[in-house]
Amino acid sequence: MAYTVHQAKTHFSRLLKEAEAGQEVVVMRGHTPVARLVAIEPAVPQRRVPGGFEALVEADDSAFDPLTDEQLVEYGFGFMLEGELVKPAPEAQPPLRERVG
């Protein structure tokens, strides 16, 4: 269908429905075609595939080795070197009954 600019402005929503229905909608200025309204194909959403990144990252077993003291300082974790990581357990005390005696 062909419409003048005035008709297209007045009935724009109807022209959009026609274009969505697959009809060719042409807007004319006088007797000269100026524009054509065409429906856009809806994008088909891509389905995600689980496990799609399996082969993208490779790491050998050394990636899980503990860091050296120099590496800890270099990466900004030098504060972890100060003091003891695990405090020694207090000496075992005898049960309360034996202490009270």
Image (tube, rainbow, N blue to C red):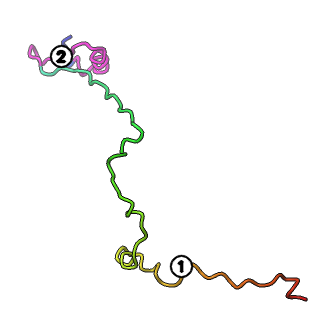
Magenta residue check for 70? no
Q: What stretch is highlighted in magenta?
A: 7-33
Image x and y of residue 26, in percent: 18, 16
Image x and y of residue 32, in percent: 8, 16
Residue 21 in which image quadrant: top left
How crowded pointer 1 is (Cα within 10 Å; few <14, some 14-19, many 20+) is rated as few
Q: Which amino acid does label 2 sit on?
A: Val
Q: In this view, does 51 lie above or below 1?
A: below
Label 1: which residue? 85
Q: Disc 2 vs disc 1: Cβ atoms closer than 8 Å?
A: no
Q: What residue type is labelled 1?
A: Leu
Magenta residue check for 10? yes
Q: Is residue 78 above or below residue 99?
A: above
- Secondary structure at badge 2 equals strand
Answer left or right for 45 relative to 15.
Answer: right
Q: How far apart are marks 2 and 1 (CA)?
A: 78 Å
Q: Residue at x 9, y 13 (%)?
A: 31
Q: Residue at x 83, y 81 (%)?
A: 95
Residue 64 in which image quadrant: bottom left
Image x and y of residue 56, in percent: 32, 48
In what quadrant of the picture does the N terminus appear? top left
Label 2: which residue? 26
Name the mark on residue 70.
none
Q: Which residue lies furthest to the top in this view?
A: 1
Q: Earlier in the sequence, mark 2 or mark 1?
A: 2
**Observer-nearest of 45 and 87:** 87
Image x and y of residue 44, in percent: 33, 28
Q: In this view, does 51 lie above or below 84?
A: above
Q: Residue at x 28, y 24 (%)?
A: 41
